[in-house]
Image (tube, rainbow, N blue to C red):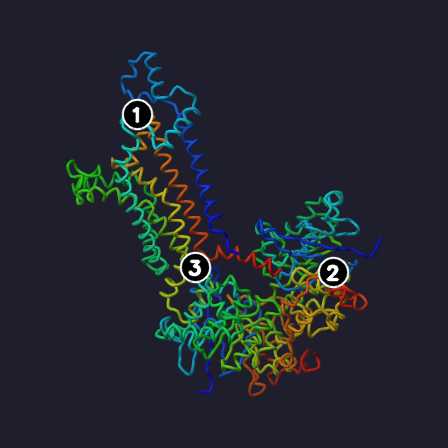
């Protein structure tokens, strides 16, 4: 039995839209319920000298005096037109502020993501190949040790060693002043944060690959493969790896936000001018419009990646497709 | 060379947390070209481990501890995994108990069979490989092979999967087929079909088969010779007729007597009292002695040697010693069916 | 009271697999069990025989049909509620896989005594432990097993513990769902002897579900053959095995391996083509007490 792909993807799209809508309502309400005064981020110190009337006027000007649901509807109307409001802190269009920074984050998280997953795959295969021999044991022990170290502490240690003591690498920023288009300079600035981003998740996924592979090598079909004369290499790469890849790819998709979240923390520690530092600031300074857009961006990414992961799982792995067909054939024969 | 496979005094040990299990103890037998030798025994008697040790498919915890394995007259006991790769598939192949898990679920059946051909003839042109796969599928009785080539294992029923496993096993024309309980997981009607197929292949291709089973009915259908295993040892071996109509070992008697088909109309099935011994610390004498109602004094002290009854029939029981008291077997002869 | 213990009438059970998919696991099955009878239900895997057992034990609620146990309709919620204590005591089930049906964290003594404890039955032998010991000795295990955990036992011993637990309630009906399928030949014989003993000495009725036909032939008084959810033939054992009528039964019987090489090698096997299976029709009596699924108009 074949499912109609339009219905299938249509359903997924609907789920996506509903989730995004629910998310936007939740973020909007929760951000406004948090204690603190958004006027502080707009007017800074001046707020304390303002009279009650002036404050009222300022609130009205920023649209903060209406009930929350009316504010939400207004935000939604403007957002539909592509207007996400201005940042209270930067006094600029939210999109402009984000636009100037998103590139930095994409470089850091994108390359970090690829390195993490390729590295994990390599390490996992290496460990599985040498199961219980010394390379596997050393990697397992070292990896577990490494993943126990909190990343902010490790960041500080790395800064101390490579920036403060050795002066090999810069400790913060994305580039030195005046070197915006100097690639080498950018790479220099990327190394330390990148190391942290990769190390954070590397062993977690490598160990997962290792265990999944080893689980596969215990399967009966591996014995059959051996008995037909396949070599260890052919079995590991041609059969076992092939069988775990779909689930690995879907896990990769689901873990995009996981890695991205890690990047946010690393950005803050290294004062790296990206979305991470921006999110942190916007939450701190009640920069509602900014917070809203950033939360929505991250949220949409999470939901989208989860859906992609699901689709990969359901479409690529014949074992999952099997259930549909099996049920169908059982019914026709029974 | 008269025999394809010769096992001499083979011993296999398995390390476990409780100690070392002597799973196979001093087993010797020969396999002749084109014959079906059945190895019969209860679970834990070492029949499966024996089978896997021949092809060196043992789990990591198991090790061959003594004895020799000769394949086609060549001593392969100390062959490395690399050396074995060349023999596996080509000289001997394996058919597993559970066809539901023995196939890779994510690769189409045809491709899995093709892979088995390509391992040994990597330069074969695509067309030729395809034709060979189709021919194999036809040989093992998979109907509409062209349509089924691209199907995944989950599209197949248990019987069809076992046929596919057999096609894979036969892909490189092996001389020996090792079948470990190939029908246990299947329904009775499918079991009969697979057994007939085994027999048919043996006649058509002249493949010698080692059939491991716990079911004396299944063995009767397929085997030329039968070896009975107990506690890691072969206790009796002979042609099927000798084992079924003239069994000599008390354990063989016990097995036969517990079969309902041979006990129609009797009020009670005969059972073998007690349990098989653990093989971590096997008894000094005959391992079957404490369950054996005919046990002699000597059984508790000394393991019986293999006594020869005819050219083909051997049994390891002191009852066959000339000094032993004469006992009329409680079972045997054609009259009991 | 009549001598009919169990009367299954037009039982159907449909599994809903998804919105569009339905599986007729059991399709219009009717049979009766007399008191003190051993009734065998055979068929291939997926033929619905276990589903029938589970409907009888109220594990599944049937989609259609009635099951009368001592004239109580157990499928009727109200009637079941009224008699549920009696029903739960008098009917016991044993599963194929005793490894998973015994609680791994309980000792044998507690496992056997549990049903008595639940139903607050005063043990006839004073203490629960004494009762457990008695039941255990009845199934052929000594008191040293009382304090063991299921994991320490072999498959055959675990199955005996499961039987001892069922027997502790002195049931009227014992439903045994493939109780010997995972056991060795000599152990199978022990369990079968035990069933026979229970039936003869204590008058337990046993619904014995199996795919090993030679054991069924040895143990059962009457046999029902199921195929794809349908009951295709019911007859007294000797009659069924000597004179099978339905083509599927014939194929099934011809496939039982006989432990005799000369006979077995020369035996012709009959094939049954799934395509020719006729689902329609009703059980028709072809000989005394011998029913076959047939289309009425064929007669």
Judging from the image, mark 3 belongs to the subunit labelled A
* Observer-nearest of A13 and A299: A13
> Which marked residue is nearer to the observer: mark 2 or mark 3?
3
Alpha carbons under labels 2 and 3: distance apart = 46 Å
Judging from the image, mark 2 belongs to the subunit labelled C
Q: Is residue C73 above or below residue A36?
A: below
Alpha carbons under labels 3 and 1: distance apart = 55 Å
Q: Is residue C71 left or right of residue C259?
A: right
Q: Quadrant of residue A282?
A: top left
What residue did someone put label 1 on?
A88
Q: Is residue A290 above or below residue C189?
A: above
Q: Earlier in the sequence, mark 3 or mark 1?
A: 1
Q: Position of residue C37 (x, y in %)?
A: 77, 61
Q: Secondary structure at mark 3?
A: helix
Q: Secondary structure at mark 2?
A: helix
Residue name at image x 17 percent, y 37 percent: A176
What residue did someone put label 2 on?
C198
Q: Quadrant of residue C49?
A: bottom right
* Observer-nearest of B25 and A169: A169
* Observer-nearest of C143 and B139: B139
Assess disc 1: are there few (<14), some (14-19) or many (≥20) residues with their C-alpha within 10 Å of its C-alpha: many
Q: Is residue B316 left or right of residue C78?
A: left
Q: Are discs 3 and 1 located on one and the same chain? A: yes
What residue did someone put label 3 on?
A216
Residue name at image x 47 percent, y 84 percent: B3
Q: Secondary structure at mark 1?
A: loop
């Amino acid at each position: 039995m074949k499912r109609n792909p339009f219905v299938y993807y249509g359903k997924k799209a609907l789920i996506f839209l509903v989730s995004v809508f629910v998310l936007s309502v939740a973020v909007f309400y929760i951000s406004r319920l948090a204690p603190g005064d958004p006027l502080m981020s707009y007017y800074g110190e001046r707020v304390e000298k303002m009279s009650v009337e002036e404050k009222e006027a300022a609130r009205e000007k920023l649209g903060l005096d209406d009930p929350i649901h009316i504010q939400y509807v207004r935000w939604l109307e403007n957002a539909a037109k592509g207007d996400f409001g201005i940042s209270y802190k930067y006094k600029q269009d939210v999109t402009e502020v984000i636009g100037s920074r998103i590139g930095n984050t994409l470089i850091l998280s994108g390359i970090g993501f690829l390195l993490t997953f390729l590295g994990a795959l390599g390490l996992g295969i290496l460990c599985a190949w040498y199961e219980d021999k010394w390379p596997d044991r050393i990697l397992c022990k070292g990896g577990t040790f490494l993943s126990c170290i909190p990343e902010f502490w490790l960041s500080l240690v790395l800064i101390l060693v490579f920036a403060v003591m050795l002066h090999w690498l810069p400790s913060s920023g994305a580039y030195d002043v005046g070197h915006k288009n100097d690639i080498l300079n950018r790479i220099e600035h990327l190394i330390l944060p990148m190391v942290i981003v990769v190390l954070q998740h590397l062993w977690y996924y490598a160990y997962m690959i290792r265990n999944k592979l080893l689980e596969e090598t215990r399967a009966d079909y591996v014995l059959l493969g051996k008995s037909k004369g396949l070599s260890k290499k052919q079995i590991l790469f041609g059969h076992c790896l092939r069988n775990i890849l779909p689930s690995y790819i879907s896990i990769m998709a689901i873990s995009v936000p996981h890695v991205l979240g890690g990047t946010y923390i690393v950005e803050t520690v290294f004062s790296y001018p990206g979305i991470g530092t921006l999110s942190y600031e916007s939450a701190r300074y009640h920069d509602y419009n900014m917070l809203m857009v950033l939360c929505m961006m991250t949220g949409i990414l999470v939901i989208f990646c989860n859906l992609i992961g699901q689709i990969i799982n359901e479409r690529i792995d014949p074992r999952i497709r099997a259930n549909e067909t099996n049920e169908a054939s059982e019914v026709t024969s029974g | 060379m008269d025999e394809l496979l010769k096992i001499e005094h083979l011993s296999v040990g398995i390390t476990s947390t409780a100690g070392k299990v002597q799973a196979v103890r001093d087993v010797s037998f020969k396999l002749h070209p084109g014959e079906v030798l059945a190895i019969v025994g209860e679970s834990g008697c070492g029949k499966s481990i024996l089978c896997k040790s021949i092809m060196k498919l043992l789990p990591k915890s198991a090790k061959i501890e003594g004895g020799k394995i000769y394949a086609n007259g060549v001593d392969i006991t100390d062959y490395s995994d690399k050396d074995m790769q060349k023999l596996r598939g080509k000289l001997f192949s394996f058919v597993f108990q559970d066809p539901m898990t023995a196939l890779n679920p994510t690769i189409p059946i045809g491709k899995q069979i093709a892979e088995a051909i390509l391992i040994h003839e990597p330069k074969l042109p695509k067309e030729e490989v395809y034709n060979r796969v189709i021919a194999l599928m036809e040989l093992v009785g998979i109907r509409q092979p062209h349509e089924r080539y691209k199907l995944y294992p989950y599209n197949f029923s248990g019987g069809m999967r076992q046929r596919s496993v057999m096609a894979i096993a036969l892909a490189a024309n092996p001389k020996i087929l090792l079948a470990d309980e190939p029908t246990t997981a299947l329904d009775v009607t499918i079991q009969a079909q697979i057994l007939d197929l085994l027999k048919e292949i043996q006649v058509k291709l002249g493949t010698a088969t080692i059939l491991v089973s716990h079911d004396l009915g299944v063995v009767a259908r397929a085997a030329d010779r039968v070896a009975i295993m107990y506690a890691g040892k072969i206790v009796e071996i002979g042609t099927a007729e000798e084992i079924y109509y003239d069994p000599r070992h008390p354990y063989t008697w016990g097995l036969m007597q517990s079969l309902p088909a041979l006990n129609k109309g009797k009020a009670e099935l005969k059972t073998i009292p007690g349990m098989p011994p653990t093989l971590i610390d096997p008894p000094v004498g005959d391992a079957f002695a404490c369950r054996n109602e005919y046990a002699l004094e000597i059984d508790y002290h000394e393991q019986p040697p293999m006594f020869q009854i005819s050219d083909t029939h051997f049994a390891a029981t002191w009852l066959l010693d000339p000094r032993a008291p004469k006992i009329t077997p409680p079972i045997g002869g054609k009259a009991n069916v | 009271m009549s001598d009919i213990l169990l009367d299954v009438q037009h039982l159907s059970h449909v599994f809903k697999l998804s919105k569009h998919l339905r599986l007729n696991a059991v399709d219009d099955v009717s049979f009766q069990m007399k008191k003190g009878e051993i009734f065998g239900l055979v068929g291939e895997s997926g033929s619905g025989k276990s589903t029938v057992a589970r409907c009888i034990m109220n594990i599944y609620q049937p989609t259609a049909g009635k099951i009368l146990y001592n004239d109580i309709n157990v499928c009727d919620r109200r009637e079941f509620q009224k008699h549920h204590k009696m029903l739960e005591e008098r009917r016991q089930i044993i599963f194929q896989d005793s490894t998973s049906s015994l609680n791994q964290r309980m000792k044998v003594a507690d496992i056997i005594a549990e049903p008595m404890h639940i139903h607050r039955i005063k043990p006839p032998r004073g203490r629960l432990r004494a009762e457990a010991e008695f039941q255990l000795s009845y199934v052929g295990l000594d008191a040293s097993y009382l304090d063991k955990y299921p994991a320490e036992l072999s498959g055959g011993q675990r199955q005996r513990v499961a039987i001892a637990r069922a027997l502790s309630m002195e049931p009227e009906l014992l439903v045994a769902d493939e109780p010997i399928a995972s056991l060795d030949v000599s152990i199978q014989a022990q369990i079968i002897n035990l069933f026979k003993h229970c039936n003869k000495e204590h008058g337990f009725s046993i619904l014995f579900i199996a795919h090993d036909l030679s054991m069924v032939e040895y143990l059962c008084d009457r046999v029902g053959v199921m195929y794809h959810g349908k009951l295709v033939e019911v007859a007294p054992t000797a009659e069924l095995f000597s004179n099978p009528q339905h083509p599927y039964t014939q194929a099934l019987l011809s496939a039982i391996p006989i432990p005799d090489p000369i006979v077995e090698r020369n035996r012709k096997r009959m094939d049954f083509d799934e395509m020719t299976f006729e689902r329609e029709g009703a059980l028709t009596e072809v000989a005394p007490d011998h029913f076959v699924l047939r289309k009425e108009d064929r007669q």
